[in-house]
Image (cartoon, rainbow, N blue to C red):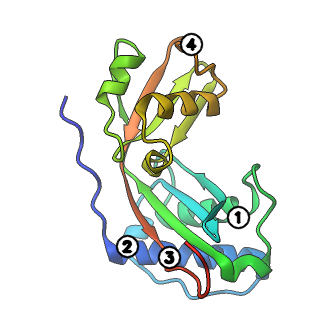
Amino acid sequence: MEPKPSIEVDERLGQVLLAHARAAITEHLTGRRLPRPEDPRLDEPGATFVTLTEEGELRGCIGSVRAQRPLRQDVAENAIAAATRDPRFPPVTADELPLIRIEVSLLSPLEFLEFRDEEDLLAQLRPGIDGLMIFSGCNSATFLPQVWEEIPNPHHFLAALKLKAGLDPRRPARNLMAARYTVAKWKEPLPAGAVQ
């Protein structure tokens, strides 16, 4: 089956989503309201991931893989969750806000894959393009396409994703299911004086 094309990167929409994410985090942490630009697409269902970095290091990442709520709500709630509820990090403080850089990824619909075994699954993946979500029983996990930058080897990519899902990366997972997706992503400019 021919893979679905990547979703279109629209700079106007990206700037709107980044502004909504920044405003949601600022209001949650400080009570101060920031202006939020409008776009009719914000009322359409959408699935986003919001990634926060500080001085080039991950500071939080939370998201949705299915479009089940309006885009404005999805990006705002994921932004607040990335700042305050990522279990890997302490909550972002108001003092950190000027140093935080926000990235918003807008996901295409999930495309479930048919495969004979894990080698066949790996052969279907497009490194650098596909995000991947795996399911095995009650276990599931996803990696955004950006993770290929850190783990370019497909075998290592799948092994790390299985580990994230609580599965043994050395053994074939039972009843493994997988879906891929693409993203359009936008990142804020670096804060003044910050490092990449």
143 on left or right of 33? left
**Three-letter residue code for mark 2:** Leu
Q: Residue at x 41, y 32 (%)?
A: 154
Q: Secondary structure at mark 1?
A: helix
Residue labelled with disc 4: 171
Residue bearing the label numbered 3: 188
Q: Up-down: is 22 above or below 86? A: below
Label 2 or label 4, whichever comes before in sequence order: 2
The correct choice, above or below, for 1 with respect to 120 in the image is below
Q: Is residue 124 left or right of residue 18?
A: left
Label 2 element class:
helix
Q: Is residue 146 above or below residue 55?
A: above
Of badges 4 and 1, the one in the foreground is 4
Q: CA distance from mark 2 to mark 3?
A: 13 Å
Splitting the image into 4 quarters, where does residue 53 fall?
Answer: bottom right
Seen in the image, is 111 located left or right of residue 192? Answer: left
